[in-house]
Image (tube, rainbow, N blue to C red):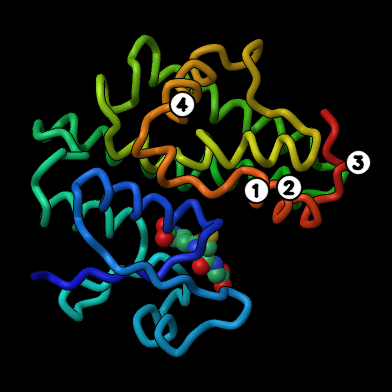
Amino acid sequence: MAEVKLLGAWGSPFSRRVEMALKLKGVEYEYIEQDLANKSPLLLKYNPIHKKVPVLLHNGKAMAESLVILEYIDETWKSNPILPEDPYDKAMARFWAKFIDEKCMPAIWQIMWSKENEREKAIEEAIQHLKTLENELKDKKFFGGETIGLVDIVANFIGFWLGAAAEATGMELVNKERFPILCKWIDEYVNCSVVKENIPPRDKLIAFLRPRFSASSWKY
Ligand SMILES: N[C@@H](CCC(=O)N[C@@H](CS)C(=O)NCC(=O)O)C(=O)O
């Protein structure tokens, strides 16, 4: 039987993406939790360039970067495809996954790390990107249509982590008034069994996030 191992971290949305894809496809794997404050020889050996989780090992071959790993999983295990078959639809799914990683997530992190006088600008920028994402969703149940696809998996940070961060910090970036469509998607999303199985315990995540941000500087 193929040997699949995942080096991950419980609170990492990136490694949770990979777990979601593996579970969607019913792939058995061994999960090896990593301490990111004290990186293991295994992590440094298999991801010497970025030194980050997730790392997937398949029959001894290692690969890093969640988007790369998700595509590998989809090509290797064909059941429950996460990318569309049509080349144009596939290109669009890749486009939106990149948009989340290169625009939405950095803009959201920027709010967290910005100085007080730069925070409002950072918030406006994040809102603008999330609006763009909301417009893409329009009247679809999931970004992938009727079922969860690549973009939904990649958007786990928005679907779950953002809500936990809001609770930890007091700053609610995504709410029903501002993002009615995205909120509807979040409701559907967190109620899917494969999502429920692949998100960290909410209280543990909130407790992890709280000391990392000063709540007072987060009000908006
Ligand atoms: N672009 C990477 C990002 C992975 C990433 O940022 N992983 C974080 C955990 S959430 C990490 O391993 N950080 C350790 C470090 O930066 O030293 C991916 O998509 O896999």
| Disc number for residue 216 | 3
Camera-near label (3 vs 2) is 3
* Residue occupying the point 52% across, 42% down: 157
The local secondary structure at tag 3 comes to helix
The local secondary structure at tag 4 comes to helix
Quadrant placement of the N terminus: bottom left
The local secondary structure at tag 1 comes to helix
Of residue 163 and residue 115, the one placed in the foreground of this image is: 163
Q: Do the residues labelled 1 and 4 touch (CB within 8 Å)?
A: no
Identify residue type, mark 1. Trp
The local secondary structure at tag 2 comes to helix
Outermost residue to the right = 216
- Percent across and percent down for residue 55 are 35, 69
Q: Earlier in the sequence, mark 4 or mark 2?
A: 2
Q: Mark 1 points at which residue?
A: 109
Camera-near label (3 vs 1) is 3
Q: Mark 4 points at which residue?
A: 133
* Residue occupying the point 63% across, 27% down: 127
Say which quarter of the image contains residue 3: bottom left
Q: Do the residues labelled 2 and 1 touch (CB within 8 Å)?
A: yes
